[in-house]
Image (cartoon, grey):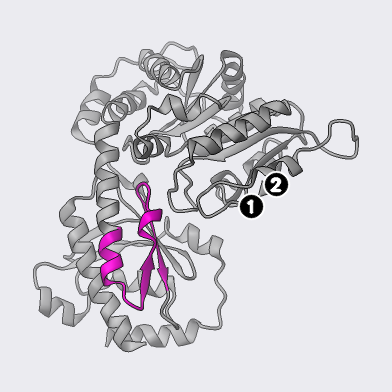
Amino acid sequence: MASRFLLANVLHRRGNKISNWTLGACCYHMDVGSAELGSDARVIDMRSDVLTKPNKRMRQAMADAVVGDDVFREDPMIHEIQAKVANMFGMEAALFVPSGTMGNLVAMMAHCSNRGDEVILGDKSHLFLFEQGGIAQVAGVHPMPVINRNDGTFSIKELKSKIRPTDDPHQTLTRVVSIENTHNFCGGRVLPLSFIEEVAEVSHEHGLIVHMDGARLMNAAYALDRPPLDLVKKCDSVSMCLSKGLGAPVGSMLAGTTEFIEKTIRCRKVLGGGMRQPGILAAAGLVALSEADMRMAHDHEIASKFAKGIAKIGGSVIEVDVPAVESNIIMLHVVKEGLTSEMFCQRLREVTEEESRKFKDNLTKVVAGPWSTTCVRGVTHFDLSHDDIDRALRKFEYVIKEFSDSL
């Protein structure tokens, strides 16, 4: 009955066009609760690794944190995390900011001293797609996209072709080249060190700055089995999120030269990011950094397990490129004609009467993100267990069979 209901919805919606960007955003705005059948089911939320809750060690560290006014630069926990991250990246200084979006924005504001300066960045980068065009809207920085390949890299030849001449008053001036590691939209792909080095070499030859959006940089470092320093030593600045795979509740870090960080402090202040006693947040971030390897190992292991499981049960409905799952993001491709990612995700969140009878007290709902009309994104994180992945795979298998039989 549920399948017939879904099919009716499909036929009703089939004339509606849904953009990739709209669906990509939907994964953050889904109601995971329900008072309907199966309201007592275990909910396995795979929308994003931002969903992790601070663990007991983090909560205790937050409670015990010695704090001060950070606008006056008097918060000891902020000093500690900034020094730790600067040392970890081999850079002169670091700055704590409330979010990764603010980190990237203040970096562009500090690097681009004149309104109209240009940054070259991937057309599938988070900075280009998912930060509300803040670099243009707020900072007056002009984005020049290059085409991201499926692995998150882009053509060095195209990069060179997009660098502006400095002697033509009709054109803006290129200031920054931005890269993303791991690459979110491309499925958590890890940039090869050789690519980073080549981008940096070309950029620096032309007097350009290299910024790395390293929101999930620790995932990339773990995947390559290299210290974070090795991934950013050719870059001029880097941002890193504490509240994704690392599991802290709030905050991102930005690192670079002392001069750069001093500029970003001013930029952070005008955006409202100067905070009074944020050491309670830094305390959780310090715990997150100390647990990084353990968290990355867990997340990558269960992501690989999930991808391999889907490859076995997907049949003619869902496909996954298992070798492309390099970190904690899994992109599932809907290949069944008449089936959309939105339909599939909606069904994962439901429990039918047949399921209730079959599984009784062992019911499961899975929340995943419809990333485009034919792509579903799943993200593993530390609040998911191996048992959760087993249950999620059982749910996927049940729903896949249902769609295989009904469409």
Q: Residue under circle 2?
A: 158
In the image, taking residue 28 as reference, residue 118 lies left or right, namely right
Residue situated in front as seen by the camera: 353 or 141: 141
Identify the secondary structure beneath mark 1.
loop
Say whether residue 54 is visible.
no
Of mark 1 and mark 2, the one earlier in the sequence is: 1
Q: Quadrant of residue 282?
A: top left
To which residue does mark 1 refer? Answer: 147
Q: Residue 325: say if magenta.
A: yes
Q: Measuring from the top left, give residue 265's x and y in whole percent.
A: 57, 20
Q: State the CA–CA distance, disc 1 to disc 2.
A: 8 Å
> Where residue 3 sits: x, y (%)?
31, 85
Q: Amino acid at mark 1?
A: Ile
Asked if the stretch drawn in magenta spans residue 238, the answer is no
Q: Are the residues tagged 1 and 2 within 8 Å (C-beta)?
A: yes
Amino acid identity at mark 2: Glu
Q: Is residue 76 visible to us here? A: yes
Mark 2 element type: helix
**Residue furthest to the left:** 361
Q: Is residue 209 above or below residue 50?
A: above
Name the one closer to the observer, 206 or 2. 206
Q: Nearer the viewer, residue 167 or 100?
A: 167
